[in-house]
Image (tube, helix red, strand yellow):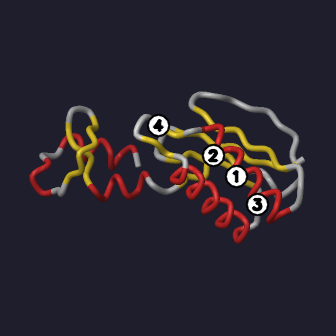
Amino acid sequence: LLRLLALLLLQPLSGFECQTLIMAGRPIPKDLKKMMQKATVKHTDMPTEMRQEVVDIIAGAVDKFSTPTGVNSESSTRYIKETLDKQYGANWHCAMGKGFTFDVTAQNGTMMHCYYQGELAILVYKC
């Protein structure tokens, strides 16, 4: 993704359809913006099916609670936690933010650390 980003910054934008968002003084191309709308899983020990369901829950929560000034992290994390509690049983935890580190003990097969929209980190786990 970083190579693609670097290549896009070096190329003229005449061949791209652009949105109104700005990246390094230039509009973000639609294809790059679409890639940023997906969660990028950094680490997980979840089974494949569960992983995809949790990524969908995270994306839905962030999109649902996005405002023009940013994401309402408190509402998003509450929604993610409550949804995971209903779907997979109680005691799920969710943390969301920019620039944090963690060291948690979680049940095997229940932890995910991912990034959404490039810079928003989300951690979910069950203990």
Query: In the image, what residue occupies the spot 47% across and 37% down?
Result: 70
Q: Earlier in the sequence, mark 4 or mark 1?
A: 4
Which amino acid type is marked by label 1?
Ile
Tags 2 and 1 in contact by the CB under 8 Å rule?
Answer: yes
Task: Say what secondary structure mark 4 lies in.
Answer: strand
Query: In the image, what residue occupies the spot 77% across and 53% down?
Result: 82
Which amino acid type is marked by label 3?
Met
Q: Which mark is residue 80?
A: 1
Which amino acid type is marked by label 4?
Gly
Query: In the image, what residue occupies the spot 70% across and 38% down?
Result: 95
Between the C-alphas of marks 4 and 1, the distance is 17 Å
Between the C-alphas of marks 3 and 1, the distance is 16 Å
Camera-nearest label, 3 or 2: 2
Q: Earlier in the sequence, mark 3 or mark 4?
A: 3
Which amino acid type is marked by label 2?
Ser
Task: Say what secondary structure mark 1 lies in.
Answer: helix
Tags 2 and 4 in contact by the CB under 8 Å rule?
Answer: no
Between the C-alphas of marks 2 and 4, the distance is 12 Å
Q: Tell me if 119 is positioned left or right of 21 in this view.
A: right
Q: Which mark is residue 76?
A: 2
Within-10-Å neighbours for mark 3: few <14, some 14–19, many 20+: some
Between the C-alphas of marks 3 and 2, the distance is 21 Å
Residue, far left: 14
Tags 4 and 1 in contact by the CB under 8 Å rule?
Answer: no
Q: Tell me if 48 is positioned left or right of 63 in this view.
A: right
Q: Which mark is residue 46?
A: 3
Q: Earlier in the sequence, mark 3 or mark 2?
A: 3
Within-10-Å neighbours for mark 1: few <14, some 14–19, many 20+: many
Q: Earlier in the sequence, mark 3 or mark 1?
A: 3
Tags 3 and 1 in contact by the CB under 8 Å rule?
Answer: no
